[in-house]
């Protein structure tokens, strides 16, 4: 009888071929340091990414939970090649990079200072975060409601969290509103702020 491979191994193979994951690996993220959870999050985000314009890879040393970790640029490419990094003057791991390293979750974000849109990918080994691959991306402006829902269902449980925040005060949740909200807002804004789009 022919053996059919099911479960994680097969889906992992599929997840590795997702363009956003291919880009993270091409940037230098070691395959064995990307968790299955990270691969799934990258696959969810991939549908919303229109272009990857550059990357920066960082090495992390020290204890992330104790706030003593430092971060150092290893490599950069695309529109990030040769750009100076704050970490050269101040290698303390802090801000969004610290949060991603601590939570060990792939995170989509908008730079607070420069407005750049990013996907931050934690590299982990033995439950420690050893590095970060930061992909500079251009997200789609908006998505059809069904695609936006699928995006949020696969990314950090945001669909459920948003649904709960809305139905706290509203009688129901209208998926069609998802299509009116910029994708980066869906991914980056606090859910209680996003929920205002549903208030009647």
Image (cartoon, rainbow, N blue to C red):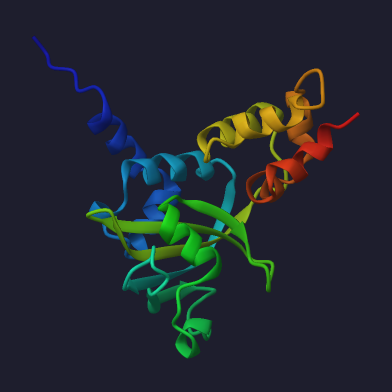
Left-right relation of 169 to 69: right
Q: Residue farthest to the front?
A: 66
| 55 relative to 43, above or below | below
Q: Position of residue 124 (x, y in %)?
A: 30, 57
Q: Residue farthest to the right?
A: 200
Left-right relation of 132 to 96: left
| 154 relative to 140, above or below | above
Quadrant housing the N terminus? top left
Left-right relation of 107 to 173: left
| 77 relative to 37, above or below | below
Number of labels in the image equals 0
Left-right relation of 73 to 135: left
Q: Residue at x 52, y 53 (%)?
A: 107
Q: Residue at x 68, y 28 (%)?
A: 163
Quadrant housing the C terminus? top right
* Picture quadrant where residue 122 is located: bottom left
Q: Position of residue 128 (x, y in %)?
A: 29, 59
Q: Residue farthest to the left?
A: 1
Q: Position of residue 116 (x, y in %)?
A: 64, 66
Instruction: Looking at the picture, tell me which residue is in the foreground, 151 or 77.
Output: 151
Q: Residue farthest to the bottom?
A: 89
Q: Residue at x 77, y 37 (%)?
A: 195
* Picture quadrant where residue 72 is located: bottom left
Q: Residue at x 42, y 58 (%)?
A: 102
């Amino acid at each position: 009888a022919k053996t059919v491979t099911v479960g994680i191994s097969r889906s992992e193979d599929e997840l590795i071929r997702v363009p956003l994951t291919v880009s993270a690996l091409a940037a230098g993220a070691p395959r064995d340091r990307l968790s299955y959870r990270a691969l799934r999050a990258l696959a969810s985000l991939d549908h919303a990414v229109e272009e990857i314009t550059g990357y920066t890879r960082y090495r992390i040393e020290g204890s992330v939970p104790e706030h003593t970790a430092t971060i150092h640029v290893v490599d950069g490419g695309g529109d990030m090649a040769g750009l100076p990094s704050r970490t050269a003057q101040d290698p303390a791991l802090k801000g969004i990079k610290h949060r991603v390293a601590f939570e060990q979750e792939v995170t989509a974000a908008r730079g607070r200072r420069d407005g750049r849109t990013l996907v931050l990918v934690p590299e982990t080994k033995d439950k420690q975060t050893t590095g970060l691959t930061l992909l500079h991306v251009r997200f789609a402006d908006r998505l059809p409601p069904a695609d936006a829902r699928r995006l949020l269902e696969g990314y950090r449980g945001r669909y459920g969290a948003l649904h709960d925040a809305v139905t706290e005060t509203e009688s129901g949740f209208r998926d069609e509103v998802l299509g009116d909200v910029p994708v980066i807002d869906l991914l980056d804004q606090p859910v209680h702020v996003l929920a205002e789009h549903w208030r009647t």
